[in-house]
Image (tube, helix red, strand yellow):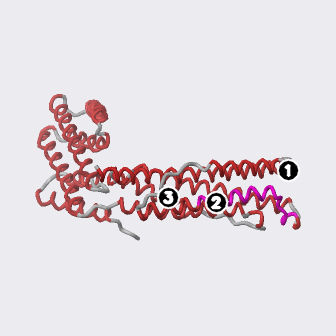
Amino acid sequence: MFIGARTIKTGIAVTTTLFLCNLFHIEPASFAVITAVVNMQPSVSQSLNNAWQQIGVHLLAATLALFIGILIGANPVSIGAIVIVLILICNWIGWSGGIVLGIVSIIFILDSPPESFLNHALSRSLSIFVGLGVALLINRVLAPPRYKAKLLDALQSLLFNSSAFFLESLHTFIQAGSLTSYQKLDPQELIIQLDDLTMIYEHAREEITIEDNPPIIERLLEICRGFIERGQSITQMTAQRVERRQTTYSEAELQEISEQFQGIMNVLSVGHGKLTELIRTLRLSLTEKKRSGFYTEDISYWESFDKAIDEWNRQVSGVFYLRALMEVSVVATELRWAERRTKTVLNLIDKQYNSKQKTRHT
């Protein structure tokens, strides 16, 4: 079982906090430990942001609790009322992430015995600052996880695998007329890979700068998801097409494909080749940091596809052929989507390259 860096850091933070509390007789130690764990964030900057927020929330909670405790005293109504006030103020200021610990602070402080109320409140305040200090120190001393490099590597891998899955699904549909059986491709590993990458991206957001071009990263995530989902759709139609042909046609008829329908498949095959080249260019642009040029939609290609569809429609009729037409149309739509999205990313990369060149010359 793999033990991550954050797990180890949290264990060290708990041990250090308890040791300091025992050494300096700070009570309650449990509250200090809870504070340290809550503020053990995936990165230094996130821990800093959360810690300052927790400090502000605790100071606010302590002030409100002391005010109510001294003037009114602790009772269910006063505690409930001050919790509502704390939540409203925190939401208004933008400190919603520290509300829970602030509520705990109020309860801890107002739960103190009346005869030692002030001492109890100050002790609680000290314990939370110890926890915060330990969390910040551990995150500073121990190198935090670096998610950006991991994100970019994983994104390259997923782009390669998901695009290969989509291209293979498309190729198999085009060649389905010669298939006697078909086992659908299983994208489960790709789905798991995508989910893991999405989680990494959430952690890496604060490490990503303008120079990394966040829109490109988001577009790549979108296109990877599309390759997987749309590839699944194509494989499903391929399985249905093969099964339909097997149950409807005789052995001799299975070998016959009309010239017009084969023309449609040929046009799709050309589109498959064009998309393969586009994806190859995209991979090279990302790995070698080279400009790819500006791309526009290939209108002439889609006009040739429409022409092939029209020629086939003039030769056939009936519900059976209508289903085949719908399948071909869906596959063509998925192909067009992939072409457009890939060109969009390539154009973003080209735009980024041009911007860098202009910056260097100015």
Residue topped by disc 2: 272
Local secondary structure at mark 2: helix
Left/right placement of residue 146 relative to residue 268 reads left
Left/right placement of residue 359 relative to residue 140 reads right
Q: Alpha-carbon distance for marks 2 and 3?
A: 24 Å
- Let me know if residue 306 appears in the view: yes
**Amino acid type indicated by mark 1:** Gln
The stretch of residues the image draws in magenta is 253-275
Residue topped by disc 1: 315
Residue topped by disc 3: 194
**In this rendering, is residue 196 above or below 127?**
below
Q: Residues within 10 Å of mark 3 (few under 14, many from 20)?
A: many
**Residue at position x 27%, y 48% in the image:** 50
Find residue 285 and name its label: none
Question: Which residue sits furthest top?
Answer: 72
Percent position (x, y) of residue 121? 16, 42
**Residue at position x 74%, y 57% in the image:** 240
Local secondary structure at mark 1: loop
Question: Which residue sits furthest bottom?
Answer: 1
**Residue at position x 14%, y 53% in the image:** 26
Q: Residues within 10 Å of mark 1 (few under 14, many from 20)?
A: few
**Amino acid type indicated by mark 3:** Leu
Q: Return the disc, 1 or 2, that comes first in the chain's sequence.
A: 2
Q: Alpha-carbon distance for marks 1 and 2?
A: 25 Å
Q: Nearer the viewer, mark 2 or mark 3?
A: 2
Percent position (x, y) of residue 58? 21, 42
Q: Is residue 254 magenta?
A: yes
Query: In the picture, which quadrant includes the N terminus?
Result: bottom left
Q: Main secondary structure of the magenta part?
A: helix
